[in-house]
Image (spheres, rainbow, N blue to C red):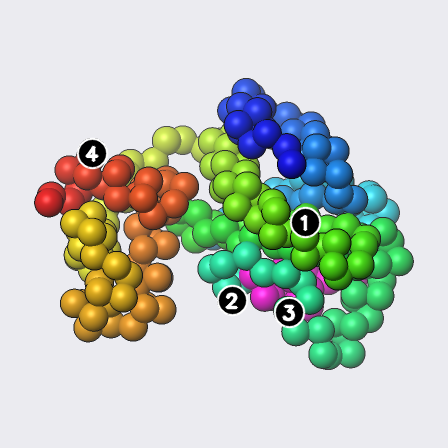
Amino acid sequence: MPETGGLLERLEEAQRLDDLQTAIEDLRDRYRVDHLVYHWVSANGTQYGCGTYDPVWVQRYLEKGYLRIDPVVVGCYQHFHPVDWKRLDWSSKAARAFQKDAIAHGVGNQGYSIPIRGPNGQFAVFSVSHNCDDEDWEEFTETNRRDLILVAHYFNQKALELEPGRTPEPAQPLSPREVEAMTLLAVGYSRAQVAETLNISEHTLRVYIESARYKLGAMNTTHAVARALSRGLIVV
């Protein structure tokens, strides 16, 4: 398993978007997989991507308009948590034809994607794919899942920092519900206790927590609570 610390240091050193392409190729080699891909879409429709797919496949993907039917993109947009491609909906004729075309172009028969939601409507997907049997893939994802999630969010954070024309944005204020949720988490409530206290479902609570986390630029919930405390956004 790669040393995550070294991978994150490499990302921190990136000075240009081109450096992220080099970084993702290095990540692919370290994880010993066929492909790694990062793709963002901002609220105004701006797109940026880097990865290790064959350029022929990338061009074909664009020309065929596969973005509209790709079960990975559709599935990630509907989830907050990482998804194994096998658990996505490949039942339609269009999806099966897309899958066959992707495998023929070397994408791999296995995949794992991490959906990322950034500030101001930014949405990104970080995917790893490989050609192997189910048993080997399950072992790989179980072993590397946590590190891949961490790397994906660091990758997205760095990509946002390097976005052309981007200017530093003022910190976004937390909504009253987000403040309540983060405050209760800060004092040690479990998610179930927070949801019960606020009289909302755990699914709705997750939406509030994820929103607060991205507003705060935090890597996880604990980090978000710490940032909210340090900035005086919540008081306990």
Q: Amino acid at mark 2?
A: Gln
- Which residue matches tag 1? 140
Q: Is residue 201 left or right of residue 151?
A: left
- Which residue matches tag 2? 78
Whichever of labels 2 and 3 marks the residue nearer the N terminus, that label is: 2
Which quarter of the figure is the C terminus placed in? top left
Residue 41 visible in this rendered orientation of the protein: no
Residue located 79% across and 72% down the image: 96
Residue range (magenta): 61-76
Q: CA distance from mark 1 to mark 3?
A: 19 Å
Are dots 4 and 2 in contact, CB under 8 Å?
A: no
Mark nearest the camera among 1 and 2 is 1
Instruction: Name above or below for residue 137 compared with residue 32.
Output: below
Instruction: State yes or no: residue 183 in magenta.
Output: no
Residue located 26% across and 38% down the image: 226
Q: Is residue 55 left or right of residue 86?
A: right
Mark nearest the camera among 1 and 3 is 1
